[in-house]
């Protein structure tokens, strides 16, 4: 089910990542429209129900990739993270701050240690990957337990509490990647899946009822239940056009994550100027734009034909450098 012993991507993991990132777009579309017109019946409840699960699922999926990444030499490991995570985080943080008129010395410096935009997920990932390499001999499950314990001790609602909580799911993902048989065995037990669904529903409903459950260690059981459910469901979806589309979104989730909010805000502003923000069709229209614009960029990025587009999401030269050197080294020995 989950294995990091080869470079072959596992489709259902990409599909799950695609769903999670699309739910982030749904969330931000709803929040933007809510700020303009007030509460949105149905949409608000939908987003609140899923709120406890979106980011932990993304962290879990990122953690699954950790063992394969750590199998590389340190130089290759860190070059890859700088190219594929740090670069788009820094570039798009500057773009977002500049577009919002908030770019200044303090906010620019905050990109390095505070993450003043909605890209905080990438900042967390960078921290986790930076910590994970020197701690590679520590069992991931121990690190996950430490993350939850630290989250218990930190102030409620603080950025450090959120980071510690999500670190637990990042390292849980790494543990599952190293022990796929354990996960498969658990998911083959019907009562485990059914119990996970019940726990997830309880936490989702509590969040809708405005109980303080988000990123709280004492409610981690509900998030674990949600992970059990999705890890059982997604491998059973098979291969079809829908799953293929979701897998594409998952493979290029970085594009959707960093670029979706701009089109949402611009389209909503134009609709507001036209006096249409109260119309029934605004949410689906803005949502389609919020997904469609990143989808177009992802398609261009996937073709690898436009260096300027590639540079928006990675540093290709930095990513290639280790392999180029290893190639020259191999040639010199022949």
Image (cartoon, helix red, strand yellow):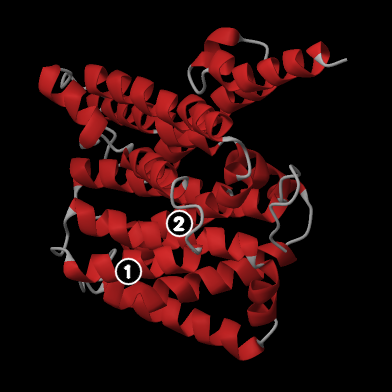
Q: Quadrant of residue 95?
A: top left
Q: Position of residue 172 (x, y in %)?
A: 49, 64
Classify the position of the N terminus by image quarter: bottom right
Please name whichever residue, 45 or 160, is drawn nearer the observer in this view of the structure: 160
Q: Which residue is depicted at the point 69% across and 80% down?
A: 185
Q: Quadrant of residue 247?
A: top right
Q: Which residue is mark 2?
A: 170
Q: Which residue is mark 1?
A: 148
Q: Is residue 310 visible?
A: no
Q: Quadrant of residue 110?
A: top left
Query: Quick one: label 2 or label 1, which is nearer the N terminus?
Result: 1
User: In the orientation shown, which residue stands out farthest toward the right?
Assistant: 334
Q: Which residue is depicted at the point 52% across and 27% down?
A: 79
- For the image, the number of numbered tags is 2
Please name whichever residue, 54 or 138, is drawn nearer the observer in this view of the structure: 138
Q: Is residue 24 left or right of residue 8?
A: left
């Amino acid at each position: 089910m989950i294995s990091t012993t080869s470079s072959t991507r596992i489709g259902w993991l990409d599909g799950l990542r695609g769903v999670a990132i699309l739910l982030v777009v749904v969330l931000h579309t709803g929040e933007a429209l809510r700020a303009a017109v007030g509460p949105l019946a149905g949409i608000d409840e939908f987003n609140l129900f899923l709120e406890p699960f979106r980011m932990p699922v993304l962290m879990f999926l990122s953690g699954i990739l950790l063992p394969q990444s750590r199998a590389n030499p340190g130089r290759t490991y860190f070059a890859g993270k700088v190219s594929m995570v740090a670069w788009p985080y820094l570039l798009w943080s500057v773009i977002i701050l500049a577009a919002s008129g908030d770019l200044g010395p303090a906010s620019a410096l905050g990109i390095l240690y505070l993450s003043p935009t909605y890209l905080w997920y990438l900042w967390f990932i960078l921290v986790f990957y930076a910590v994970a390499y020197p701690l590679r001999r520590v069992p991931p499950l121990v690190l996950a337990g430490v993350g939850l314990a630290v989250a218990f001790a930190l102030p409620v609602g603080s950025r450090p509490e959120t980071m510690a909580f999500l670190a637990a799911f990042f390292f849980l993902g790494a543990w599952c990647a190293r022990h796929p048989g354990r996960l498969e065995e658990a998911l083959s037990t019907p009562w485990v899946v059914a119990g996970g669904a019940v726990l997830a529903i309880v936490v989702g409903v509590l969040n809708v009822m405005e109980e303080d459950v988000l990123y709280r260690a004492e409610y981690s059981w509900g998030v674990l239940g949600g992970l059990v459910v999705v890890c059982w469901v997604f491998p059973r979806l098979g291969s079809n056009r829908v799953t293929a589309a979701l897998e594409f979104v998952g493979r290029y989730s970085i594009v959707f994550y960093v670029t979706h909010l701009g089109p949402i805000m611009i389209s909503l502003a134009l609709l507001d100027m036209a006096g249409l923000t109260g119309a029934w069709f605004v949410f689906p229209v803005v949502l389609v734009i919020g997904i469609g614009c990143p989808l177009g960029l992802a398609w261009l990025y996937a073709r690898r034909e436009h260096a300027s587009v590639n540079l928006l999401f990675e540093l290709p030269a930095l990513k290639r450098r280790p392999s180029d050197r290893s190639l020259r080294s191999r040639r010199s020995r022949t």
